[in-house]
Image: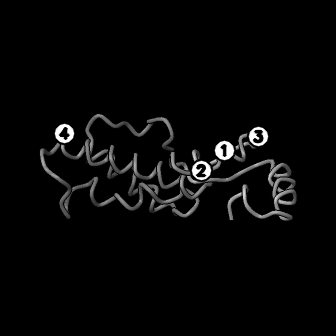
């Protein structure tokens, strides 16, 4: 129901809107525009699911680009970077010691310019 309608409900809706302090939203522009008109006074934060999804997408794009640059083709079953693609987007807390070692080994084999002391990797 639009705010311009609803005779007796409108003041209560305005009170509710004014009481909102923080809005957790998807990072898409359409959502930011959607809340801009009535919730411009709020603090906007990106919800964790979409932040992680965007970060995982970037990690996968980098993996594919390095794969193409080093081997000249898309990932294949036996390619080191292709084999660790799921581990790369797993949370560190979900990996055991074997998983961490597989990531490091896959990075070393898949990209000769990667060192084991790369920032962010143990």
At horizontal 32% and vertical 47% (from top left) the residue drawn is 61
- Looking at the image, is mark 3 or mark 4 nearer the viewer? 3
Q: CA distance from mark 2 to mark 1?
A: 7 Å
Q: Label 1 belongs to which residue?
A: 37
Q: Could you say whether the residue bearing mark 3 is in a helix, strand or loop?
A: loop
At horizontal 72% and vertical 55% (from top left) the residue drawn is 4
Drawn side of residue 34 relative to residue 118, left or right: right
How packed is label 2: few (under 14 Cα within 10 Å), some, or many (20 or more)? few
Residue situated in front as seen by the camera: 115 or 2: 2
Determine which of the numbered discs, if any, sits on residue 52 in the image. none
- Residue 65 occupies quadrant: top left
Q: Label 4 belongs to which residue?
A: 69
Q: Are marks 1 and 4 in contact (CB under 8 Å)?
A: no
Q: In the orientation shown, which residue stands out farthest toward the left?
A: 72
Residue situated in front as seen by the camera: 18 or 50: 18
How packed is label 1: few (under 14 Cα within 10 Å), some, or many (20 or more)? few
Q: Are marks 2 and 1 in contact (CB under 8 Å)?
A: yes
Q: Residue 89 location, x and y as percent?
A: 44, 56
Q: Label 2 belongs to which residue?
A: 34
């Amino acid at each position: 129901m639009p705010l311009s309608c609803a005779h007796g409900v409108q003041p209560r809706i305005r009170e509710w809107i004014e009481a909102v302090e923080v809005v957790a939203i998807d990072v898409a522009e359409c959502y930011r525009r959607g809340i801009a008109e009535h919730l411009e006074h709020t603090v906007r934060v990106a919800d964790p699911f979409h932040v992680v999804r965007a970060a995982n997408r970037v990690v996968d794009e980098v993996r594919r680009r390095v794969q193409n640059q080093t081997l000249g083709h898309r990932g294949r079953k036996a390619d080191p970077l292709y084999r660790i693609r799921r581990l790369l987007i797993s949370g560190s807390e979900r990996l055991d010691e074997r998983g961490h070692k597989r990531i490091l080994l896959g990075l070393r084999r898949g990209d000769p310019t990667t060192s084991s002391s790369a920032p962010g990797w143990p």
